[in-house]
Image (cartoon, rainbow, N blue to C red):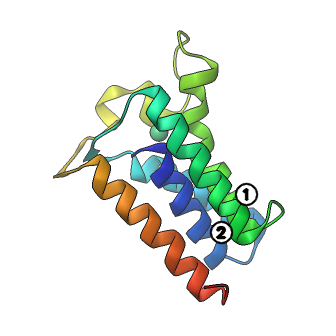
Amino acid sequence: MMTMAHAAAGAAIAHAIRSPVLAMAACVGAHALLDLPRHEDLDHRSEAVLAIATGALTAALFGLRSREFWGGFVCAAPDLEHVLRPNARRLFPTHRYPRLHACLPTPNVSAPTQVAVSGGTLALVTLRDGRG
Ligand SMILES: [Zn+2]
């Protein structure tokens, strides 16, 4: 999935799981699971803009020290290797082994769908948190 979708999913996971250790472990696992369905990815610049916007929105909604912000960061973090190690062999399994990326025969999840679901996810978490 797009980095934005990973960040929104991580915020929701961290909101739902009270234990920080379990929440962060679930966020890393969720990144791998979210990379499995067929999906659209954008160019690195567009991904970066949307990911930074999602991080800023999450920080504004929940605070920089919130588990929602850090869950989003941790869930999205494996995609940093695309930026920090652009020409190196990938480390995260769903990036390293191409047959694991977008390998499930699901309908293709388009970028606009991912943006809409990510925004909806953050809205629901905000409402559940009593801030909406
Ligand atoms: Zn990924």
Q: Is residue 65 left or right of residue 105?
A: right
Please state if 95 lies on the left or on the right of 87 as rendered. left
Q: Residues within 10 Å of mark 1 (few under 14, many from 20)?
A: many
**Could you tell me the amino acid type at mark 2?**
Ala
Camera sees residue 121: yes
Answer yes or no: do the residues labelled 1 and 2 have beta carbons within 8 Å? yes
Q: Give the answer, above or below, for where 50 lies relative to 26.
A: above
Front-most of 73 and 78?
73
Establish if 51 lies above or below 59. above
Disc 1 within 8 angstroms of ligand 1 (CB) = no
Which residue is painted at 67% across and 59% down in the image?
Answer: 71
The x and y percentages for residue 11 are 61, 65
Q: Which residue is mark 1?
A: 70
Position of the C terminus, as image quadrant, is: bottom right
Q: Position of residue 123 (x, y in %)?
A: 51, 76
- Please report the residue visible at 53 percent of the width from the left and 33 percent of the height from the top: 92
Instruction: Judge by depth and name the residue closer to the eye, 114 or 6.
Output: 114
Q: Is the C-beta of the residue carrying label 2 under 8 Å from the nearest atom of ligand 1?
A: no
Would residue 22 be visible to someone looking at this image? no
Percent coordinates x, y for residue 91 in the rendering = 56, 26
- Which residue is tagged 2? 14
Rendered residue at 29%/31% (across/down): 99
Precedes in sequence: disc 1 or disc 2: 2
Q: Residue at x 73, y 57 (%)?
A: 70
Query: Mark 1 belongs to which amino acid?
Result: Trp
State the SS at label 2: helix
Count of marks overlaid on the render: 2
Is label 1 in a helix, a strand or a loop? helix
Q: Position of residue 37 (x, y in %)?
A: 28, 50
Q: CA distance from mark 1 to mark 2?
A: 8 Å
The local crowd at label 2, few if under 14, some if 14 to 19, many if 20 or more residues have their Cα within 10 Å, is many
